[in-house]
Amino acid sequence: AEARGGRRGFGSVLGSGVAGMACAVAALVLVGAPGATGGTPGMAGQVGPLSDTLFDTLRVGFVASFCSKLSDTVSSEVGKAYGKTTYLATSFQKVPRGTEGAVSLEGTVAGVVASVVLGVCALAGRMVDMRGLVCVIGSSVVANCAESLLGAAVQRGGHVRWLTNDVVNMLQISMASAVAMACYVVFNV
């Protein structure tokens, strides 16, 4: 949006929400309303423990996408406004605030805090359980770091023209969703 004078377009909306939307639609289509007793089956006709597990996993992906996006936005804005020293994520070379792929301690901490706060809200609202919360926060941090690395390594030089900020956002939130869902399934103990 900065390249367009701060204006957001359809690509910005899609890039910031596609993973969450995909998880929500998949939950509705594949599972329907959760619950082994009296649940409404989705198009796959599933009702029961398997559909509850799938629904919970998709909710974790949904929450992770938005925690990751919030973490990215907060870390970027706090880093630009309050970052004392900013470093390039790939080389840790000092760079000016606002440089694509730059990170700061202040921005990074603020991003983690934002992810924790939104994740705890999701826990309080019963969107995720404690295992899901850990997966959501962890995946948000991983995806936010990966987004900074991608910005520093590829996006910063403009070598890949199609790799716009909207595409990078889409990759970041999709990574957060995928990592969180995989973590949730793998650590199902």
Image (tube, rainbow, N blue to C red):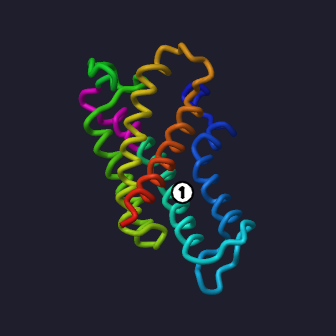
Q: Is residue 118 magenta?
A: no
113 displayed left or right of 169: left
Q: Residue at x 41, y 47 (%)?
A: 140
170 displayed left or right of 137: right
Is the residue 78 above or below the residue 4 in the image? below
Tell which of 148 and 1 is nearer to you: 148
Q: Is the magenta stretch mostly helix, strand or loop?
A: helix
Secondary structure type for disc 1: helix
The residue range painted magenta reads 74-86
Is the residue 7 above or below the residue 184 in the image? above
Splitting the image into 4 quarters, where does residue 121 fall? bottom left
Q: Residue at x 41, y 54 (%)?
A: 183
Quadrant where the image shows the C terminus: bottom left
**Residue 67 horizontal/vertical position (percent):** 45, 52
Splitting the image into 4 quarters, where does residue 117 fall? bottom left
**Residue 99 horizontal/vertical position (percent):** 40, 22
Q: Residue at x 51, y 62 (%)?
A: 57
Tell which of 162 and 41 is nearer to you: 41
Residue carrying label 1: 62
Is the residue 14 above or below the residue 180 in the image? above
